[in-house]
Amino acid sequence: MLQSFSQVTEDILCHPKFQALRYSEHHGGENTLFDHSVDTAKCAYRLAKRFRLKEERIEAVTRAALLHDFFCYDWRSPSHQRYVRRYAGLQRLRRMHAFTHGALAARRASRLFPMDERQRAAIKSHMFPLAPLPRSSEAWILTLADKIVASREMSAAVGYHMRRWYHKVVPAH
Ligand SMILES: [Fe+2]
Ligand SMILES: [Fe+2]
């Protein structure tokens, strides 16, 4: 029988290194990497059920989705920016966060949690078209879930910044 979302994800959600994602801002506004990862996993769980994947594959893609951005560094930090600027042209492009973090997240996640090759490949390709072509249903579901959630978060962030700007320029009565 298919396990519930909480049963599938409980061990990851409780892990202190995963909990630390609560302190990383993501896609602007008040959104964190923790929120983004949980929402992406929920979306992947729903999509996998809708596409009638087998139970074990629904569970596998849900866990992969939860860990898809488990890269755990601040790509906006001056040290990361300095690292990228050490390179030029194509070399710099290849080291930019958008191109590299899928592979880093897959590596880091598999050090802490049991994962199979299909899950690792799905995480690595989630930034498609900036990453390799997704090669399984799980990988396509993960990239789709990430894009659905990211676009929702970015529109929420635009609203958040517009409200802040409005309150700054229009003084309260
Ligand atoms: Fe990502
Ligand atoms: Fe993401």
Image (tube, rainbow, N blue to C red):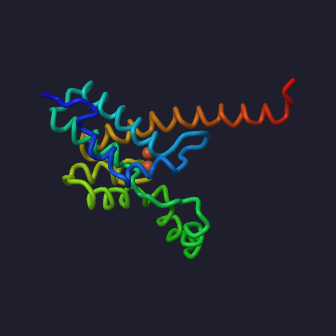
Q: Quadrant of ligand 2?
A: top left
Residue 109 percent coordinates (x, y): 31, 56
- Between 27 and 125, which is closer to the camera in this rendering? 27
Number of numbered discs overlaid on the protein picture: 0
Horizontal side of 93 relative to 171 (left or right) equals left
Residue at 26% x, 58% y: name it: 110
Residue at 27% x, 58% y: name it: 112
Horizontal side of 39 relative to 107 (left or right) equals right
Residue 166 percent coordinates (x, y): 78, 31
Which quarter of the picture shows residue 54? top left
Q: Furthest residue to the left? A: 1
Which quarter of the picture shows residue 6? top left
Horizontal side of 97 relative to 82 (left or right) equals left
Residue at 48% x, 66% y: name it: 95
Residue 40 percent coordinates (x, y): 39, 37
Q: Is residue 158 above or below residue 122?
A: above
Horizontal side of 13 relative to 93 (left or right) equals left
Q: Furthest residue to the bottom? A: 86
Residue 78 percent coordinates (x, y): 61, 67
Q: Is residue 52 above or below residue 63?
A: above
- Between 38 and 19, which is closer to the camera in this rendering? 19
Residue at 55% x, 44% y: name it: 27
Q: Is residue 24 above or below residue 8?
A: below
- Between 100 and 90, which is closer to the camera in this rendering? 100
- Between 64 and 38, which is closer to the camera in this rendering? 38
Quadrant the N terminus occupies: top left
